[in-house]
Amino acid sequence: MNSGFVLSIRQAFSQIGRNAAMTLATLFSISAILMILGFFFIVLVNINNISEGAKENFNTIEVKLLDETDKATADAMMDELRNMEGVRSVAFRTKDENLENWKEKWGDAADMLDRLKANPLPNSIIVEIDDLSKAEDTVRAAEAMTGTDTISYAQKTVDKLINFTGLVRVAALILIAVLLIISIVVVSNTIKLTVLAREREITIMKYVGATNWFIRGPFLLEGIIIGIVAAIVSGGLISLAYHYIVQNFGVNIALIISIGFVPEKHLLPNLAVIFLAIGMSIGACGSIISMRRFLDT
């Protein structure tokens, strides 16, 4: 391994040790910022998941039936719906079939549904629409039928979700930009203290011919190391929090909106990569900024 690089690593760890208090303060600050970023990332991913799930059912109306609605009544309702203009097909789906569909959608997380003591889902009639302009008429007709409990139709929900997702995305991007700037400033100020303490040494090194990158190396690595550790700490805490939420509230959320959380195995690895990239970038940028006044750029 290159001797200069090894020396830079040793000096970076030495500097971290000499400024332990400021290093810890910076570490906690970056970790807190990354956790906030992670929270918004998780919210956005799950909102997008809900939105896409609703879009898949955009042309489908689910007529949920009362528990006391018998099959004969359901058949009569289906015949009436089938004869309405704009309806492509009508099918009866039992509560057990609805539960199986949920399990299929949830994939690896479907084992959480096994905790249910009883199937809470109703029997339902699935109406596919081929003319969306007639959908509202179909919904009103189904609501007026005897035996209907509630109607699930995604059009209004999708419109609201698209608008809400757009607002959340813009707000999140603005907040992320502000938090990244703050974190870079925090790292820059921390490393600047180390640079000031070694200002005379840096000046001597420049006089004897040390290159800017030879001098900058340990400080750059110091920032990157702090960023990596902060990413590991914050990523671990976010992962534990998301696992707890999915395990304890996943079923309840899905009962309300019919769509579960994004599975942990799909979300958390991507989050870990993002955290490491952001943490290292924050550390590197903070270090470079802190050295600008001492070295030619």
Image: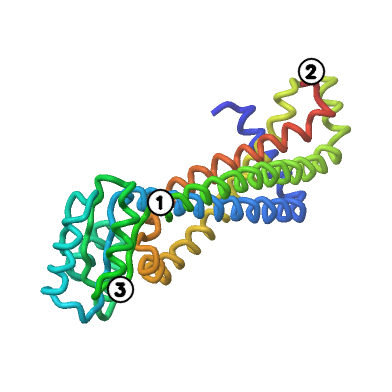
Toward which corner of the image does residue 146 lie, by quadrant?
A: bottom left
Looking at marks 3 and 2 on the same chain, the residue that comes earlier in the sequence is marked by 3
Q: Is residue 51 left or right of residue 29?
A: left
Q: Nearer the viewer, mark 3 or mark 2?
A: 3
Identify which amino acid the numbered label 3 is placed on.
Answer: Asp
**Disc 2 target residue:** 209
Q: Secondary structure at mark 2?
A: loop
Residue sitting at x 65%, y 40%: 282
Q: Are marks 3 and 2 in contact (CB under 8 Å)?
A: no
Residue 242 vs residue 47, the one in the foreground: 47
Q: Secondary structure at mark 3?
A: strand
Toward which corner of the image does residue 150 lie, by quadrant?
A: bottom left
In percent of width and height, residue 277 lies at: 55, 39
**Disc 3 target residue:** 149
Residue sitting at x 51%, y 54%: 43
Toward which corner of the image does residue 141 lie, by quadrant?
A: bottom left
| Vertical side of 37 occupied by 202: above or below | above
Quadrant that contains the C terminus: top right
Q: Secondary structure at mark 1?
A: helix
State the CA–CA distance, disc 2 to disc 1.
57 Å
